[in-house]
Image (cartoon, rainbow, N blue to C red):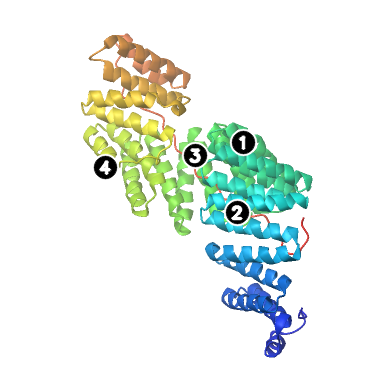
Amino acid sequence: MPSAENSDEEMWAELDEAQGPRRAEILLELADRSYHRDDMSQFATLVEAAAEAAEASDDHRLAAFARFNQAQGLMETDHPAEAIDHFLQAATFFTLLGDQDDIALCHHRAADALALLDRADEALAHWDDALRLYEAEADEHSIGRVKMAIGGLRMSTGSPSLAVEAFQEARDRFRRTHSPHHVAWADDAAAEGLIQQGRPAEAVPLLRSCLDIARVGSDDSARAYAALRLGLVLRILGDHTEALAHLKSARDDYQGDDNLMGVARCDLEAANALRALDESEEAETLYIGARSVFDAVGADDYLLLADRMRATLYSEQGRTAEAVGLARATLGRAHELGQNRIVNPLVPLIADDLLDLDDATSALEVIEANPVTGGELDEMERAIRDAVTARALLANGRVPEALALTEQALAITEARPNLALQAALYELRSRARRDNDPALADRDLAHAIALFLAAGMSERATALSGHFLPDEQPSSVRREDLFALRGLTRPLLDDPLRTPGSSAE
């Protein structure tokens, strides 16, 4: 191989006369130098020429390295479709040489490329090929990496339970290599799989362990990420005080790392926790501050999320007109950006507030102007939308439709743990049944009162009990809304894939 001490000019001069394997060696060295200068255009030209020279001279090792490096370059420049054939060509050359680890690595990377193209079955087949070879070589670390990749594919294709199994298998492999940070990587991924299955409480011990490991190192961003993840899940579970402590710790680390986006994410989650603790003024300040950062960095999706949450705060405070104004503006911008994730929860929020403003016609218009198609809402979101739509239909005198929609929402199993929502639905069904079946209406109302009490909403329960006490007058319906949160992108490990011929970890 050319000496690292040779200058580019010396190698280019020698290239004019070089033939066969020597020519391939020089081209590979020049390509490597272009790569490290981040000159990917020249790298692509040189590595292709190196591969052709190696193949013409029947040097299988140089050809394998050249094709593998060419494929890696294509992956890094977002051309996975072109990379696949080059990875598999490299595997063919390594097969001629009998290099099992490197054959496995080629199949591993080809599968990664196929997964990026959503060619799941082909990706799984090549990962299986890689696993068989890694198993034969007892390469535990590489097996763990493949299992992580398989888990990632399972998550992206909507199979979080299978993903968790893969992540747990990866964890076992990483433990055998005594690699705690990789164990934390697997635990963090498994926690996300559990959260996606609606099992956040089971994710908490995994996230606590991840934070413990991150605290040992000196990487501010890793500690901040782990603390933010734990704080977010604790906030979802209702442990707002501990959540705030972790969010503050994460914010401090992000601030020390000059990570504006990280600070804003912490502030957004802290505002949600403070809102739940009735610290409305501080929550509003944090929502506005986070929004400013999201706006400055061009993070429109988070900007919309912050505005949606602030509109929810105004609604909960009884600042209904302000809530409707902000929510309508956010809805318009979300439509412009195609952000259905933001649009869908805003519609019932606006409609519910318009009903509180006694504008039943506008409430129904908002709902009907923003239809949803199958798959756009999860079951909880569907129940919330059905409840608000039923309320709007009832306010517009469309009683049979309101009753049918209320029945539909009550049949959604996933919504039953939300006691406040269930209470509101029973109250709505009571009102829809009142004229035709007073006895059933009374039974539903009693059930609603019990559920409001169980949900800690004693004022609403007391107001509704006025139906059974002639001197009392019930107040208007209110409901508690729920919104989904986005996941986080985990910082990449400083653990690049080894190159062919290098030893496994």
Q: Is residue 78 left or right of residue 320?
A: right
Badge 2 local density, few (<14 within 10 Å), some, or many (20+)? some
Residue 222 in view: no
Residue type marked 3: Asn
Q: Is residue 200 above or below residue 472?
A: below
Residue at the spot of label 3: 272
Residue 204 at x, y percent in the picture: 63, 35
Q: Is residue 205 left or right of residue 416?
A: right
Q: Quarter-wise, where is residue 199 in the image?
A: top right
Q: Label 2 vs label 1: CA separation?
A: 26 Å
Where disc 1 sits, the SS reads helix
Task: Point out the image quarter for the N terminus.
Answer: bottom right
Q: Is residue 47 left or right of residue 484?
A: right
Q: Residue at x 69, y 41 (%)?
A: 169
Tell me the number on the disc at residue 369: 4
Residue type marked 2: Gln
Q: Label 2 vs label 4: CA separation?
A: 42 Å
Residue 351 in view: yes
